[in-house]
Image: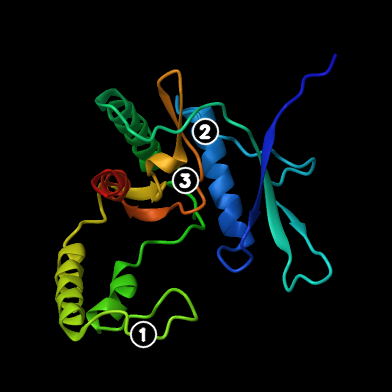
């Protein structure tokens, strides 16, 4: 008798990442699965060895890139206990240790964190509502000044973070909504934001959610 398997089909935003960048993400997940103790959803390969299939349909302005992942067993933890966070710290360290040597001799096509570009609008005091129909001011003049000063200070401090150590390919979205726990073991999912940045960024993402 055959065995039933469950899968997750991911259809990527056509404007967000290029096909080589998504392939690079999939290759890293596959390497993590093969070379570390971290359990992650290794994407399936097509018969000709690709992780992605591009699908074009009438009415779509651009083809959609599709990848198929095995469905991981586990549950989300809304109120983590210390043991959950400790286990996640161990997994995070394993990801960073792997990134230290992964692809060292090859060019990995993933973005690099550009904090200055991200903070530049705030430093200039430019604020735009995320929803198109909103026409009221987003912040007051006093709040605009506070944000601009904070952005300038952040830019200065970020420039002082070294990139010759504790820096590499990171998950970049390692909040608890992207971690499944199975028998106490954290299983990170949703690597589509992965990019090059200081390793502390992963830790900060986890702590930011807890603080919020």
- Judge from the rendering whether residue 197 lies leftward or rightward of residue 57; answer left or right: left
* Label 3: how many Cα within 10 Å (few below 14, some 14–19, many 20+): few
The residue that appears at 64% across and 65% down in the rendered structure is: 14
Judging by the rendered image, the residue that carries numbered circle 3 is 103
Mark 3 or 1 closer to N-term?
A: 3
Judging by the rendered image, the residue that carries numbered circle 1 is 136
Q: Quadrant of residue 42?
A: top right
Whole-number angstrom distance, CA of label 3 to CA of label 1: 48 Å
Kind of element beneath mark 2: loop
Whole-number angstrom distance, CA of label 2 to CA of label 1: 44 Å
Whole-number angstrom distance, CA of label 2 to CA of label 3: 19 Å
Give the number of the mark in front: 2 or 3: 2
Judging by the rendered image, the residue that carries numbered circle 2 is 40
Looking at the image, residue 212 lies above or below residue 18 = above
Q: Quadrant of residue 99?
A: top left
* Label 1: how many Cα within 10 Å (few below 14, some 14–19, many 20+): few
Mark 2 or 3 closer to N-term?
A: 2
Mark 2 or 1 closer to N-term?
A: 2
The residue that appears at 37% across and 44% down in the rendered structure is: 175
């Amino acid at each position: 008798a055959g065995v039933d398997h469950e899968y997750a089909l991911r259809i990527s935003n056509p404007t967000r990442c290029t096909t080589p960048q998504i392939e690079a993400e999939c290759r890293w997940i596959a390497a993590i699965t093969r070379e570390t103790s971290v359990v992650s959803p290794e994407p399936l390969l097509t018969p000709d060895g690709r992780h992605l299939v591009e699908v074009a349909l009438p009415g779509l302005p651009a083809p959609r890139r599709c990848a198929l992942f095995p469905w991981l067993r586990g549950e989300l933890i809304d109120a983590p206990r210390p043991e959950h966070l400790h286990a996640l710290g161990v997994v995070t360290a394993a990801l960073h240790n792997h990134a230290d040597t992964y692809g060292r001799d090859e060019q990995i096509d993933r973005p690099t964190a550009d904090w200055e570009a991200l903070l530049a609008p705030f430093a200039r005091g430019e604020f735009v509502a995320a929803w198109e129909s909103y026409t009221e001011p987003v912040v007051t003049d006093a709040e605009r000044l506070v944000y601009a000063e904070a952005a300038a200070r952040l830019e200065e401090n970020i420039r002082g973070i070294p990139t010759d150590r504790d820096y590499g390919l990171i998950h970049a979205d390692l909040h608890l909504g992207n971690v499944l726990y199975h028998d106490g073991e954290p299983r990170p999912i949703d690597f589509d934001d992965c990019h090059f940045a200081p390793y502390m960024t992963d830790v900060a993402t986890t702590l930011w959610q807890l603080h919020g």
